[in-house]
Image (spheres, rainbow, N blue to C red):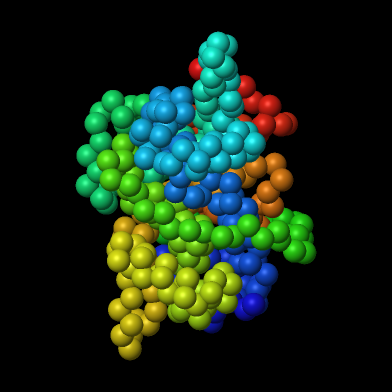
Amino acid sequence: MLFPPHWRQFAPMTRPQIAASDAVALNAMLMAVRQGADVVCDRWSLSLIIAAFLGDTKFAEFERRTGIASRLATMRLRTLVEQGIMVRLPYSIRPLRHEYRLTIMGEAFRAVVIQMVRWERNWNGAVMPGDMVAQLCGARLEPVMRCRACGAVVTARDISLKVSRSDLAQKPVKQALHRRSIISESPDGSGLQHFHESLDVFGDKWGIEILVCAFTGIRRFNDFRTCTDISANILSDRLGRLTEARLLRNPDGPGEPGYRLTAKGFDAYGVLVALQDWSDNWLSQRYRSPVKLIHEKCGQLFHVAGPDAELDAREPDNPKKSIART
C-alpha cells in the first residue's frame, strides 16, 4: 500500500512530518485505530457507557434509556465487563440481582464523552439539560478543544504528525480480524436523543477509519479503499452517510476532486484524539499508533485537556482489576 501523491499537500493537518515513501505508517496507524474501535465503537456499547455516566446501573434502566433489546443488552454488558470498562456487582441477595458500574477504566472514558457532548452542542443543535451536561462532563463545558500540556485552544490545523520509528518497528506482522461493523438505527423514544448523531458517526468502526484517513489527506474513493481495505459497497455507503451528515463534502469539480472534511467534520477531531488517548492508556494489549500528534505551539505531544486530566493519563498495571467508582 502506498501513500497517495497528495499526502504532503494536505491542508487540514498542516506540515505533516511523514515522508511520502513511508507507506507502512498509515497502515500501522489504522491498525491501532481498529484495535481501539473494536472495544467500544459500536452504537450500543457507546449507548450503555453514556447511560452509565447518566447514573443508570440496573439492567432495566439501561434498557429503558437506550431502547436496546434485552438479548443485545446482555451481550454488550457482558463484553464491557470482560473488557474491564464495567463491573457486575450484586445489589440484592434474595432474589440475586446485579447492577453494572463503571470501573476506573470506564470513568476515564469520560474524556471521550465530553468531546462528543462538545461536538453535538457545536453542530447539531443538541440543547442538553444542564443537569445532564453536569453529570456527563463534571464541569462547565467549553465549546473549544484545549491542549493538556499548555492549555491553549487547539484545532487540527495546530497539530503536526510525526512517526515514531521505535513504535513502527513493533507493528504486528498480522492483525486479528474483528472488523465487522453494522449500522443500527436508534429506536423511537430513545433516552439518548441528544447523542443521536454521535452514536451514528462514532458508533461505526468504518466511519471512524474513513474520518481518520480524511484527516491524513486521503480524498479519493480508491485511496480510501486501498488504505482501509473496505469493500467498495460498504465504503460507498459510509462515504454517502458521512456526506449526508455534512462531515464530508464531495464537490467532485475539476479543481477540488474527491472528499474533503467540512468544518463540522473537522471539529470531530477532538473525539478521535480523546478515543486514541483512552485506548493508549487503558488497552494494554493494543498496538499503539506510531504516528504521534505534536502541538506545534508548545512542541509537546498533543492530548485533549479535560476536567479529569490526571485520571485520563493514568495507566494501571491491570485495568481489568480496577474497582468500581461509586
Q: Quadrant of residue 166?
A: bottom right
Q: Nearer the viewer, residue 125 or 90?
A: 90
Q: Quadrant of the N terminus?
A: bottom right
Q: Residue at x 37, y 40 (%)?
A: 67
**Residue plotted at (25% across, 43% down):** 126
Residue 115 in view = yes
Which of 48 and 258 lies nearest the eye of the viewer? 48
Vertical comparison of 131 with 95: above or below: below
Q: Is residue 30 left or right of residue 270?
A: right
Residue 311: percent from left, percent from top: 55, 29
- Look at 62% across and 53% down and name the residue there: 35
**Is 4 placed left or right of 246 in the picture?**
right
Farthest bottom residue in view: 254
Q: Percent from the top left, x then y, of residue 146?
A: 41, 42
Kindly identify the residue that appears in the image at 58 percent across and 72 percent down. Answer: 229
Q: Position of residue 5 (x, y in %)?
A: 53, 82
Which of the 4 image quarters holds residue 2? bottom right
57 shown above or below 10:
above
Query: Can residue 15 be seen?
Result: no
